[in-house]
């Protein structure tokens, strides 16, 4: 189905309102306002597994009409660990050149060592990133105590020329950034928020509650619990599903901001199964195939990530169809 058909007519008036700025409510403005939806961009590859910058630019043109707060480059969905350093920097530079200045660019810069993270964060800033998204180091997870993580992030934040956003994604790292470490780090003037992908709404609500006096913003790491995150005070979301259903996710944010909870609940329910399909069920190969189904360029993943089987593609298509998106 064509992309324009998927964005059904009931969404269009709300999207027009979002473009006029209703997704960012009035009130005190933080140093870098993260309120809104960010897609963590996939990295398009050619059949020969080279980064396809032309297809990247095509996807960015599609996304330009969706009222995202900004874009994330080199997150988990971007196959960050599979990219060479020069590719990482080129991706950030290309996206920055294509992105309007009023839209934020967050770039993943987390490495296993503090020194390497500091160096890469500086390079990301030079390439045009507005903020650095720094995942927890995890290879030596047994040694990653709260004290070690606080020391790591503090040194990164002290050295970084751009604000730092913490990134806790235990499904990939098998390490959750402890709440006590988050609360300590939230007091640092150059640490402005956290992307929390763990799915524990109690934890997200507690972090929001305990950091109310700080200039600190909590971002939901998944579309599957986006409404629940907004209900407990989250500022926005960095959601893989936004690569496919960006307009509906922006609409969900709008409904939550407006307190239209019944409509928000109905929309959230239709997003749960598709979100699970492109994350824990089929992973990045599923996310990229879904992008193909909706008129974006998903394309292949870089090895060792393998493509979906024909049966899996049909299952993926069925999940989106049953929830009214195809």
Image: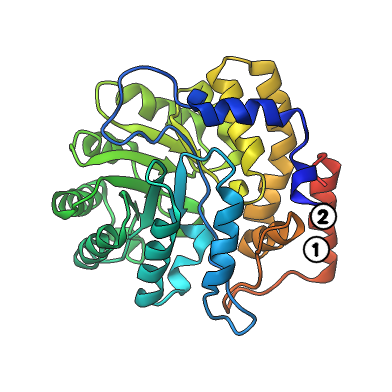
Does residue 162 sit above or below 184 in this rendering? below
Which residue is more in the foreground, 36 or 147?
36
Give the percent coordinates (x, y) of residue 263: 70, 20
280 with respect to 154 (left or right): right
Dividing the picture into quarters, in which one does residue 204 lie? top left
Does residue 296 sit above or below 239 in this rendering? below
Image point 57% across, 33% down: which residue?
226
Residue beneath label 1, please?
A: 313
Image point 26% across, 51% down: which residue?
145
At label 2, counting other C-alpha atoms closer than 10 Å, the crowd grade (few under 14, some 14-19, many 20 or more) is some
78 with respect to 209 (left or right): right
Image point 27% across, 59% down: which residue?
143
Q: Secondary structure at mark 2?
A: helix
Q: Which mark is residue 317?
A: 2
Pick out the residue farthest to the top.
259
* In contact (CB < 8 Å): disc 2 and disc 1: yes
Give the percent coordinates (x, y) of residue 316: 78, 56
3D distance between C-alphas at marks 2 and 1: 6 Å
């Amino acid at each position: 189905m064509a992309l324009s058909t998927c964005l059904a007519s009931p969404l269009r008036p709300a999207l027009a309102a979002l473009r006029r700025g209703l997704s960012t409510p009035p009130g005190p403005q933080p140093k870098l306002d993260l309120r809104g939806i960010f897609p963590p961009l996939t990295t398009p590859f050619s059949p020969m597994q080279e980064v396809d910058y032309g297809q990247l630019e095509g996807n960015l043109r599609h996304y330009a009409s969706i009222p995202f707060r900004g874009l994330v480059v080199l997150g988990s969905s971007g196959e960050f660990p599979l990219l060479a350093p020069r590719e990482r920097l080129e991706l950030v530079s290309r996206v920055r050149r294509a992105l309007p200045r009023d839209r934020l660019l967050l770039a993943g810069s987390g490495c296993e060592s503090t020194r390497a993270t500091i160096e890469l964060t500086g390079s990301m800033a030079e390439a045009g990133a507005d903020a650095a998204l720094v995942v927890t180091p995890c290879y030596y997870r047994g040694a990653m105590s709260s004290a070690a993580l606080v020391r790591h992030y503090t040194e990164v934040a002290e050295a970084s020329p751009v604000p730092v956003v913490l990134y806790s994604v235990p499904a990939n790292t098998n390490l959750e950034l402890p709440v006590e470490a988050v609360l300590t780090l939230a007091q640092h003037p150059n640490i402005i928020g956290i992307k929390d992908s763990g799915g524990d709404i109690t934890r997200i609500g507690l972090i929001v509650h305990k950091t109310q006096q700080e200039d600190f913003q909590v971002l939901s790491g998944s579309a599957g619990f986006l409404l629940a995150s907004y209900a407990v005070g989250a500022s926005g979301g960095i959601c893989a599903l936004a690569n496919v259903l960006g307009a509906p996710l922006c609409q969900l944010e709008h409904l939550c901001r407006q307190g239209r909870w019944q409509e928000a609940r109905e929309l959230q329910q239709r997003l749960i199964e598709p979100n699970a399909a492109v994350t824990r069920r089929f992973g990045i190969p599923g996310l990229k195939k879904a992008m193909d189904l909706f008129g974006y360029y998903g394309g292949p993943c870089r090895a060792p990530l393998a493509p979906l089987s024909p049966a899996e593609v049909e299952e993926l298509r069925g999940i989106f169809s049953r929830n009214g998106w195809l």
